[in-house]
Image (spheres, rainbow, N blue to C red):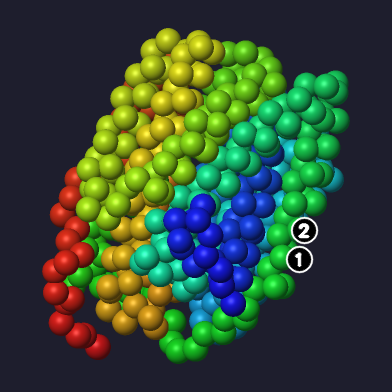
Amino acid sequence: MSKKFRWTGEVELTKDLTLLILIGGIYSLSISLSNTFVNIYLWKQTGEFVDLGIYNLSIVIFQPLTFILAGRWAKKIDRVIVLRIGVIFLAVFYIVVLLVGEHAAHYLFVLGALLGVGYGFYWLAFNVLTFEITEPETRDFFNGFLGTLTSAGGMIGPVLAGAIISRFISYKGYTIVFGISLFLFSLAVVLSFSLRRRPSEGKYLFRRILQERKYNKNWSLITSAHFFQGLREGTFLFIISVFVFITTKSEFALGTFGLINSGVSFIAYYAASRIIKKHYRKRAIMLGGLILYGAIFLIIFNVTYPRLLLYAGTIAIAYPMLLVPYISTTYDVIGRGWKAAEMRIEYIVVRELFLNGGRITSIIMFIIAVTQFDEAKSIPILLAILGAGHACIYLFIRKVHLDEPLPSPRT
């Protein structure tokens, strides 16, 4: 059963496609509501950059390890069940945060591990379901529309959370926000029961798809691009929000930062999904990567709140420009890969290993910088280096050619 709507650009909306968009939107709302504030919650308890590094490092270590396990389970049971397990672990994370309260800083590694496991199960299943439910003709719409929902959640979540947290003294506001996130993840679990079961069969050939990089040039280029994507994301995913809080001492100001970022992003994702056609993908990726790198120099040497807000608006334009065609290209490469229909799970796992390999490298470099050198001098230099990650993506993507003949069959 499917429907077409004018606002979708005549893209056919099936029941599973609609449910997947809804689950992704709820996930994004919950994450935007509280995930940024978890880092601030921990920062207020310890005031140490190295502690934030340890917490985030544990996330990106457990995430790829879980991806490998989740991939095996997705081959043996059902991708929808794996998705459900991921959301349940994310809910458990917020339960633990609520239980340990002001002692959360003593459980950095445990909290990071829970979140990493939740991310691993969730994103393995979500990415595989995206690959199965969408087609080449609908992927740009799906990625763009999901980005639009993510941005909408990003507008509501941070401001709402910032307002709640600022309204209460001590940590009571944080407790309310984390409780709302717990409810949203519970809702996502309920929605997942409406997805059509998608059992899988066959052997789990993770190592074989890792070796496929030797035979498939496009696959080698895409995985290398994901490592550099992770190189920026690893540190930037948490350090910018901390900069905002250190500069303003206000959770509401951090919420306003998120509002501006997501408000601009909301429009940019919609525009990117409608404007960036297949033949413009590489140019869009190049331009988006260059803008993302240039934006860093707005803040690394002179951090002020107005500059941070300008940075938020700038990257909100650049990310959709890069990510919408980049994600679509990635799925197209996988779709043309060796035994893609049978090995789609393994392709997703290997891609995530490279992405998180970049994140792990990034955070280890951050921990070294803040423990071995002066923070005020080392962090700006480090960000200038790591920030080039998204710009480097184009160096690999420009060599990807989807119109070339498929590689010869291999066993």
- Residue type, numbered disc 2: Ser
Q: How many marks?
A: 2
Q: Residue at x 50, y 47 (%)?
A: 147
For the question of whether residue 229 can be seen, the reply is no
Can residue 166 be seen at all in this image of the molecule? yes
Local SS, label 1: helix
Badge number at residue 190: 1
Left or right, 53 with reference to 206: right
> Which residue extends farthest front?
6
- The answer to whether mark 1 and mark 2 are in CB contact below 8 A is yes
Q: Is residue 185 left or right of residue 260?
A: right
User: Where does label 2 land, which residue?
Assistant: 186
Looking at the figure, which quarter contains the N terminus?
Answer: bottom right
Q: Position of residue 199 (x, y in %)?
A: 57, 84
Residue 363 occupies quadrant? top left
Taking depth in this image into account, of 312 and 273 the one nearest to the observer is 273
Which percent across, then down, holds residue 274?
39, 48
Image x and y of residue 238, in percent: 54, 34
The residue lying at 63 percent from left, 58 percent from top is 22
280 is higher (above) or lower (below) than 313: below
